Image (spheres, rainbow, N blue to C red):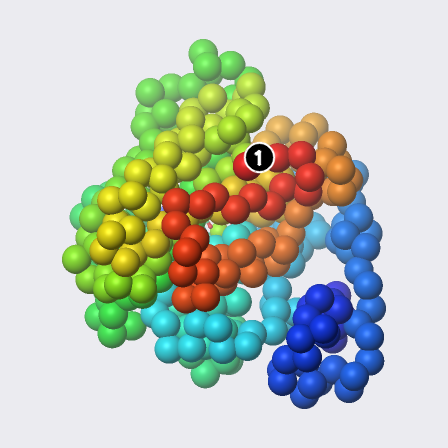
């Protein structure tokens, strides 16, 4: 997918309002329509597995995070953002989009994800924005506190917190889930956001936003994701309670609920090989989504023109997920 195709795709929607950004590159021609059913690879996908947490750069096909397609228009000019799991998947798509919208971006990732993170930081810096990499294990409260402090000192403040990192491992039976494994999932998906938000809150000013990545699993859990799915329900729930708690302070809290998206999480224990090969095939669009297809949602929720969006969960699941 070329940048021109995507810019053109946006043009089709926005042509009626003739924005200056489009006038620049659009030459007044109609943008090509894009069929969402054929825009990206469809199942069957090649069977593949990687040791956790996996690398996007080793996936086949490589996920699209908007590297060559996302075009910004200054929607987040001067904002300072921290994104957990910013090396790959939805976090990477958000990081690229934020930088292209004019934000400085700090990303956190697990230390073994350095190769993916380096690619993202390079893309951020290519936009002339500050890109800060802060590796570390989110299961540690001490690290979560340090992460926020380092992001704030590196960026010179914090306006947007994207709590996106997550752990998902498939287990056919609850009997296969050890206490250690259960704890790992809870620490990553529930405790880390709690620790990070607590550390960040004293620094957030009116206009700041918190965005959490929940899942369609919060609403319609799969039988093999007993522990993971309940953490996503908890995420959906904290979005709604914190929105009520922080709304009066002018801080908005929202969530994104993806459906089946082609990311390292799925090839490093998140899905069975059987599920992976047919991933997303059951959706009305007949394929898995790509992280790039969700980037604009993270931008929208962070942008100040979404100022009445608070306690909302925006879905993107190809037609069959919730909300
Ligand atoms: P991903 O593997 O690209 O991202 C997950 C990231 O979490 C990793 O890159 C890693 O940096 C981070 N992480 C996990 N454990 C960590 C730890 N202990 N310390 C530091 N970092 C850690 O996959 P993704 O699918 O983009 O996942 C992003 C979010 O999207 C997750 O919260 C996931 O639950 C959610 N989600 C994914 C899907 C999907 O189908 N891929 C669907 C719904 C929701
Ligand atoms: Mg990763």
Q: Nearer the viewer, residue 148 or 220?
A: 220
- For label 1, the SS is loop
Q: Quadrant of the N terminus?
A: bottom right
Residue sitting at x 36%, y 65%: 81
* Label 1 beta carbon within 8 A of ligand 1: no
Q: Is residue 158 left or right of residue 311?
A: left
Disc 1 residue crowd, few under 14, some 14–19, many 20+, Cα 10 Å: some
Q: Quadrant of the C terminus?
A: top right
Can you name the residue that lies furthest to the top here?
A: 175
Location of residue 182 with respect to 166 vertically, above or below: above
User: Would you say residue 256 is visible in this rendering?
Assistant: yes
**Quadrant in the rendering for residue 296:** bottom right
**Quadrant in the rendering for residue 308:** bottom left
Image coordinates for residue 237, horizontal then vertical, percent? 37, 34
Q: Nearer the viewer, residue 170 or 155?
A: 155
Residue sitting at x 29%, y 43%: 244
Q: Nearer the viewer, residue 195 or 112?
A: 195
Q: Is residue 194 left or right of residue 216?
A: left
User: Total marks drawn?
Assistant: 1
Q: Which residue is mark 1?
A: 322
User: Would you say residue 107 is visible in this rendering?
Assistant: no
Image coordinates for residue 180, horizontal then vertical, percent? 33, 25
Residue sitting at x 55%, y 59%: 295
Residue sitting at x 51%, y 29%: 219
């Amino acid at each position: 997918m070329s940048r021109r195709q995507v810019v053109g795709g946006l043009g089709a929607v926005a042509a009626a309002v003739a924005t200056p950004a489009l006038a620049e590159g659009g030459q007044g021609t109609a943008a090509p329509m894009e069929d969402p059913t054929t825009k990206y690879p469809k199942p069957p996908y090649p069977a593949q597995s990687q040791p956790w947490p996996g690398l996007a750069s080793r996936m086949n096909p490589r996920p699209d995070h908007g590297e060559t397609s996302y075009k910004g228009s200054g929607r987040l000019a001067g904002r300072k953002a921290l994104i957990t799991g910013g090396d790959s998947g939805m976090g990477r798509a958000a990081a690229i989009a934020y930088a292209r919208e004019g934000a400085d971006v700090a990303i956190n990732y697990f230390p073994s994800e350095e190769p993916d993170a380096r690619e993202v930081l390079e893309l951020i810096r290519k936009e002339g924005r500050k890109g800060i990499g802060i590796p570390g294990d989110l299961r540690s409260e001490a690290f979560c506190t340090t992460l926020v402090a380092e992001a704030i000192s590196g960026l010179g403040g914090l306006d947007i917190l994207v709590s996106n990192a997550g752990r998902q491992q498939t287990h056919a039976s609850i009997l296969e889930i050890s206490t250690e494994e259960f704890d790992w999932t809870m620490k990553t998906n529930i405790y880390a956001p709690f620790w990070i938000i607590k550390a960040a809150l004293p620094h957030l000013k009116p206009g700041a936003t918190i965005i959490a990545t929940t899942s369609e699993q919060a609403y319609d859990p799969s039988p093999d994701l007993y522990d993971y799915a309940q953490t996503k329900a908890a995420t959906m729930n904290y979005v709604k309670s914190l929105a009520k708690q922080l709304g009066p302070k002018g801080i908005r809290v929202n969530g994104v609920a993806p459906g089946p998206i082609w990311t390292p999480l799925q090839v490093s224990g998140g899905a069975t090989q059987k599920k992976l090969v047919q991933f997303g095939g059951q959706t009305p669009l007949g394929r898995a989504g790509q992280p790039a297809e969700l980037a604009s949602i993270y931008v929208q929720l962070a942008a100040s023109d979404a100022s009445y969006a608070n306690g909302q969960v925006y879905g993107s699941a190809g037609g069959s997920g919730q909300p």
